[in-house]
Amino acid sequence: MNTKTDTDMNAYSNSYAALNGMTMDEYSFLHHASAGLTANQTNTFMAVYSSRRKNPTDILLATLFGFFGLAGIQRFMTGQILLGILFLITGGFLGIGTIIDLFSYKSIANDYNRHLAYDCYHIAKMNN
């Protein structure tokens, strides 16, 4: 016999599984961020989060564009506009910044997604 809690947990797990390229770190902070939300608030949280979330693979692909003269796209994607402009003007700090971002693309995506989860939590709390 499934209880309401079991049904809610299955719904939460299924909504997490739908996020492409999710790491265990991201799963952990999403689980903690949505822990105190009602079912309706969790639905709002996941809808907003999944529509704005950045997949680490997309960040990696955008970083690779830096080697073809479009350095900084990954920074524009994550809302770091000034750093993106700086990357674009300097050719990714003469390629060094682009190489660093190539190795740290997962942390760039996780940092962005962690801040996004915090914002989504507040949006969901305003939704009763």
Image: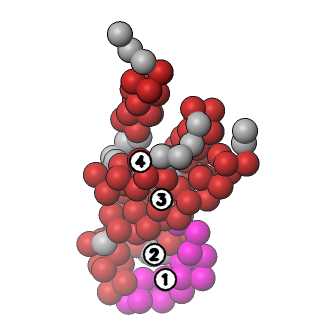
Q: Disc 3 or 4, which lies upstream in sequence?
A: 4
Say what amino acid the circle numbered 1 marks. Phe
Q: Is residue 72 magenta?
A: no
Q: Residue at x 63, y 32 (%)?
A: 40
Which label number is shown at residue 87?
A: 1
Q: Position of residue 87 (x, y in %)?
A: 49, 82
Q: Residue at x 73, y 48 (%)?
A: 126
Frontmost of labels 3 and 2 is 3
* CB atoms of marks 3 and 4 within 8 Å: no
Vertical order, 21 against 70 (above or below): above
Say what amino acid the circle numbered 2 marks. Ala
Q: What is the spatial separation of the Cα atoms under label 1 and label 3, in whole angstroms?
A: 21 Å
Say what amino acid the circle numbered 3 marks. Asn
Q: What is the spatial separation of the Cα atoms under label 3 and label 4, in whole angstroms?
A: 13 Å
Q: Give the side of residue 97 with respect to residue 83, left or right.
A: left
Q: Alpha-carbon neighbours of circle 2 within 10 Å: few (<14), some, or many (≥20)?
A: many
Q: Taken as a whole, is the magenta stretch helix, strand or loop? A: helix
Residue 51 visible, this orientation: no
